[in-house]
Image (cartoon, rainbow, N blue to C red):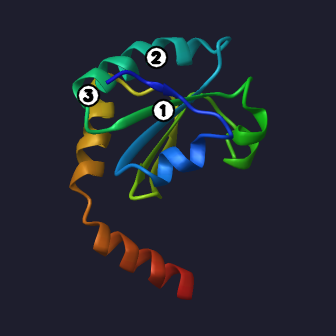
């Protein structure tokens, strides 16, 4: 599967309407973003069960601000509509594969229980 361009209009529906969504926050002028792009695109082809979204932070400034993006590239991973991973910086292919593998293996009942516990505190 190829990557999907996300906008303010499509972001929430994409994140909440799919099991696993990775989001690459990037900009055309960003050198590390250009290096990470092909790694991200290749991973998208290798994992058709995962939605790989891209947000152009120049075009979607309000969305990027709302997500608290202060450094690009930033990678986010959502599982069942919940943010489960967030990290700025370009990842090498093996590290991106590790993130994808870990997100797929998450016990979401455990994640929900821990989040509920944190909200009580």
Mark 2 and mark 3 in contact? Answer it, CB < 8 Å: no
Q: How many marks?
A: 3
Residue 26 or residue 14, whichever sits in front: 14
For the residue pair 23 and 118, the one nearer the viewer reads as 23
Residue 77 is labelled as: none
**Viewer-side residue, 41 vs 96:** 41
How many residues crowd around disc 1 within 10 Å: few (fewer than 14), some, or many (20 or more)? many
Query: Mark on residue 53?
Result: 1
Q: Are marks 1 and 3 in contact (CB under 8 Å)?
A: no
Q: Secondary structure under badge 3?
A: helix
Q: Earlier in the sequence, mark 2 or mark 3?
A: 2
* Secondary element at image label 1: strand
- Front: mark 1 or 3: 1
Residue 102: horizontal and vertical position, in percent? 26, 49
Between residues 110 and 52, which one lies in front from this camera angle? 52
Is residue 93 at least partly visible in the picture? yes
* Residue 89, image x, y percentages: 52, 30
Tell me where residue 11 appears, x and y as whole percent. 58, 43
Q: Residue at x 54, y 49 (%)?
A: 13
Looking at the image, the residue that sits furthest to the bottom is 120
Q: Secondary structure at mark 2?
A: helix
Q: Residue at x 32, y 41 (%)?
A: 99
* Residue placed under numbered mark 2 in the picture: 37
Q: Residue at x 26, y 59 (%)?
A: 106
Judge left or right: residue 70 versus residue 99.
right
Q: CA distance from mark 2 to mark 1?
A: 11 Å
Q: Is residue 41 above or below residue 8?
A: above
Of circles 2 and 3, the one toward us is 2
- Which mark is on residue 94? 3
């Amino acid at each position: 599967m190829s990557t999907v361009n996300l906008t303010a209009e499509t972001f929430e529906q994409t994140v909440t309407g799919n099991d696993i969504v990775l989001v690459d926050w990037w900009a055309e002028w960003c050198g590390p973003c250009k290096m990470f792009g092909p790694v991200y695109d290749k991973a998208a082809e290798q994992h058709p069960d995962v939605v790989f979204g891209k947000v152009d932070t120049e075009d979607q400034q309000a969305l990027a601000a709302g997500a608290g993006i202060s450094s690009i590239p930033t990678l986010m991973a959502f599982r069942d509509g919940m943010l489960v991973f967030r990290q700025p910086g370009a990842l090498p292919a093996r590290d991106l594969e590790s993130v994808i593998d870990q997100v797929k293996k998450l016990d979401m009942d455990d994640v929900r229980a821990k989040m509920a516990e944190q909200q009580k505190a």
